[in-house]
Image (cartoon, grey):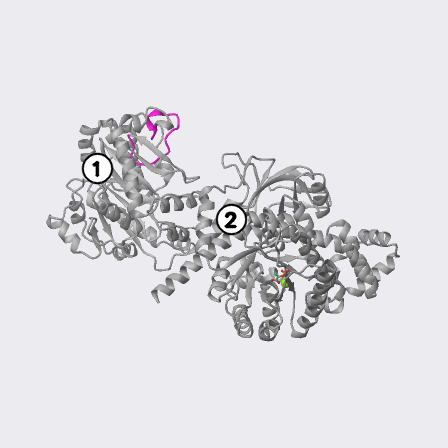
Amino acid sequence: MLQMQKGTGLGKVLQRNATMQVLTAEAPVEAARYGRRAERLAGLLRLGLPVPRAVALSFDTVRGIAEGRMPALAPILDALGPGAIVSVRGSPENPDWGGPGTILNIGLNAERAAGLAEILGRETAIAAYANFVRAFAVHVARLDEEDFAAGPAASAEAALAAALTRYEEEMAEPFPQDPTDQLAQVLRAMARAWQGTSARLLRQAKGAPPEAGLGLLVQRMALGLGRGKSGAGTIQTVCPETGAPGIFGRYRSDAQGLLAPPPTDPAHHLTRADGSPSLEDRAPDIFATLVDHVRTATAGMRDAVQLEFTIEDGDLRLLDAVPVPRTARSALRIAVDLADAGVLSRDEALMRIPPRSLTELLHRRIDPRAARDVLVRGIGASPGAATGRIVFSADAAVAAAARGEPCILVRHETQPEDVRGMHAASGVVTERGGVTSHAAVIARGIGVPCVVGAAGLTLDLRHKRLIAPDGRNLLPGDVITIDGGTGEVLAGGIDTEEPALDRAFETLMAWADAVRTMAVRANADTPAEAAVAKSFRADGIGLCRTEHMFFEDDRLVVMREVIFTDNAADRRAALERLLPFQRADFAELFRIMADQPVCIRLLDPPLHEFLPKDRGAVHELAAAMNLPVSSVMARIEDIEEFNPMLGLRGVRLGITMPEIYEMQARAIFEATVEVGRDDVAVVPEIMIPLVSARREVELVKSRIDAVAAAVRGETRTDFDFRLGVMVETPRAALRAGEIAQHVRFLSFGTNDLTQMTYGLSRDDSGRFMRDYVAQGVFPEDPFHTLDPEGVGELLEIAASRGRAARPDLTISICGEHGGSPESIAFCQAAGFDYVSCSPFRVPVARLAAAQVALDARSVAASG
Ligand code: PEP
Ligand code: MG
């Protein structure tokens, strides 16, 4: 066990010094003053673990050094032991902020190298000195790295001589021999490197404040050299990939650093499982002690740690204990196992996992061992891996899907008419666009892997080819793979792995469900999406957009007939043919969700979305409807609007063509009765979109009530249903009090509400959003992250007016924001009953809801 020099005069001098500390179990070493590494080492000492003697220099001291105020160094060296060879390591407050690399073997000079040679042998001692000279030359004297590269010298002696000569030639002075002088130069170089412009910009890009400080640790070296039991390595007791228990790490005998050992060299194995002989074979006692130290450090630091260690002639020393670098998957397993072992509470384990990181676990991914032939790197917009044949149009994607052939849809950018193709494709690539572009938002919603902004690709639609930056030509039918997490587009097919939803995931989710107070539903339009929602344990469907049910070919034809009718009777007759389809759709959803709430939104989009756009399709439609092309064109022009998002859509369709909503309500009620006969109990929820006035609700409600009464009479079956309003216009939010008198729930459609509150087009604002965010006009894209101030205030007003009018009113959000952790925090604070989001975001929302509930609980406890 290491004894600190508390008793010596020099130790005392440093201990009283607020800007330098000899590390001891008692020394007050906070990360905010000395950096994270210094704090960790002090923590290891407190746990009774063997750390080489070290002196920590505070941020202030290091800043002073950079500005030319070098502290007295002799006391530092004396505190580390007479004749100590030392290292200097950086200790920033946050390891992500970077910092200068470690310099080893400071204090070696000709005389000491000769002394060391007596212990370690000449070759080893001289090699260590030569390494120091090279590191000093490059990192301290800033000489050219190539001039000091460790080439194939005849002997260590020759290599040292070459390095010393080179140094002297370049610096016009001999290599410094005085250890204090060497240390001063190293400290100055490191302190100045931290203040340099590029280091400053780099760390500020990672979120470091302008005044971020660097601490430095001057530490006695445990040399790790020699033919006895000496070496260096890392060890951890969890698998970095999966988090499963096991011993992992690297070891290199007769070494000071963690250079990657040649894998075939048997002297460099850590465990027997890596190969024999290993450290485990050769020094079982040290190996067992190391494993024990990992356990002690894990419990003491309350996290899985990786120990960095050196063994000097059988003497084990720990140089650091850093949190195990982890993947999303291993982070989850580590948190759950630590809670199971009693190191963390379940609540703490829940708080350790960033909700968004779960996204990585929910999608198929490329086998990490597979070789990647990268064609181009774009922006990862929707996670997951997909392999398929290239198609260049939505139609081709739909055709490929019909043949059962996986395909990747490649477009310049996508538009609403590509959505069917996106559904059909296994993956989507766009040449243009960013994380909020149409392709990105839609793909995330439907869980299709997507890469956007793959600007290196040239999509040459005229010659039907895709040209990669290296000139490779890809044609329709060629196979590519995309990684929607990293944004890579790869040539050919690659092995993929299924999503890693293991026991730890289920366990953490169960803990989340036990603490959250808000329900989490899914936005699901199709049986497939409902099945995903169910598998992710959504608490029901919060938004079923029924228009998607009309896009399948056989229905689209009938829907177009509905649009082409010009009187209510004909329209009713056409709708009659859609009724069985709708009834079957709803019955299937009710059965999948089995007894859970299903909220169905009545038809919302402007009718032109159901009509063809290109000339060929217009001709086909004319033929199918037995009408002249001119009549079809005339009708299309007739319903065209300048501003369709503010035009005849939502409840306005329900008011002007009431037969549509009547048919939908009938389908919902008949499906309710049908599944009820099989003991599936449903209380369907019917939601009216785009309301802005109370009278709209009264009119639609009276018609729906009449349909309910009719179906009850015809089927001689009683059933209940809940009617609600989607609050998507600012007026509906302001008039929520009077609207709530007629309905049982309000659900905020924050996509439209954001659009209308800002007067920003959901579809076009991508063009300038990047500039707006870059210039700080908006802190974030408000379609992505709920605007808590403007849109948020409307939500709060609506919720309070609605609840004042009707205390048992259910309040929720079903816009894209329902799956964003920041928006979920807002909803919790505003007292909403549930959030609804796309099925693949349900686990993220469940964990986020648990975290905000825990936050609320701790605020309540402390207030
Ligand atoms: C909304 O507007 O927030 C919403 C959920 O409806 P849609 O996105 O279908 O317009
Ligand atoms: Mg809407």
Which quarter of the rendering shows the C terminus? bottom left
- Amino acid at the residue labelled 1: Asn
* Residue plotted at (32% across, 24% down): 277
Tell me which segment is drawn in magenta.
254-271
Question: Mark 1–mark 2 contact, CB under 8 Å?
Answer: no
Q: Quadrant of ligand 1?
A: bottom right
Looking at this view, is 187 or 675 the one in front?
A: 675
Looking at this view, is 821 or 63 the one in front?
A: 821
Dot 1 or dot 2: first in sequence order is 1
- Left or right, residue 85 beside residue 367: left
Which quarter of the rendering shows the N terminus? top left
Q: Which residue is mark 2?
A: 359
x, y percentage for residue 107?
21, 40
- Count of marks overlaid on the render: 2
Q: Identify the secondary structure beneath mark 1.
A: loop
Q: Which residue is mark 1?
A: 109
x, y percentage for residue 857?
39, 61
